[in-house]
Image (cartoon, helix red, strand yellow):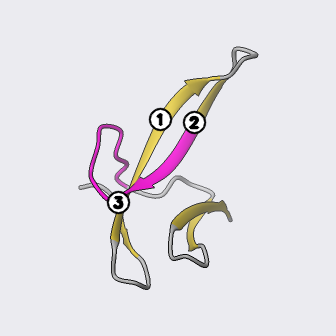
Amino acid sequence: MAFSYKNAKGTTYILHSTNTVTKTGKTQTLFFFSKEEKPGALDAVPAGYIVAETANGLPVLKKA
């Protein structure tokens, strides 16, 4: 079951991650929220992160 977050406005978002390669060749993991479940959905919030909301109600991950 994918991790979902319901914001203050009542919209449900699902947490996803993807790996990308930077120009220098390093692998970087990107975390993002989406209204629909897509490939790469995570079951839990990664260790060391918490979910917060922006002023517009969009969920974001912040380091704890």
Q: Which secondary structure, mark 1?
A: strand
Give the percent coordinates (x, y) of residue 28: 63, 31
Q: Which region shows up in magenta? A: 30-43
Query: Given the current orientation, which residue lies at the most extreme right position?
Result: 24
The amino acid on which the numbered mark 3 sits, given as a three-letter code, is Phe
Picture residue at 35% right of the left edge, 60% below the top: 3
Secondary structure category for the residue under label 2: strand
N-term mark: 3 or 2: 3
Q: Residue 41, position in %: x, y? A: 34, 46
Q: Where is residue 12 in the image (x, y as percent from the top left)?
A: 32, 70
Tag 1: residue type?
A: Thr
Q: Which mark is residue 3?
A: 3
**Residue at the image position 56 percent from the left and 40 percent from the top:** 30
Q: What SS does tag 3 mark?
A: loop
For the residues labelled 2 and 1, say whether their Cβ atoms are less than 8 Å apart. yes
Q: Earlier in the sequence, mark 2 or mark 1?
A: 1
Q: Give the Cα distance between marks 3 and 2.
A: 17 Å
Q: Mark 1 points at which residue?
A: 18
Q: In the picture, which quadrant includes the C terminus?
A: bottom right
Q: Residues within 10 Å of mark 3 (few under 14, many from 20)?
A: some
Outermost residue on the front side: it is 56
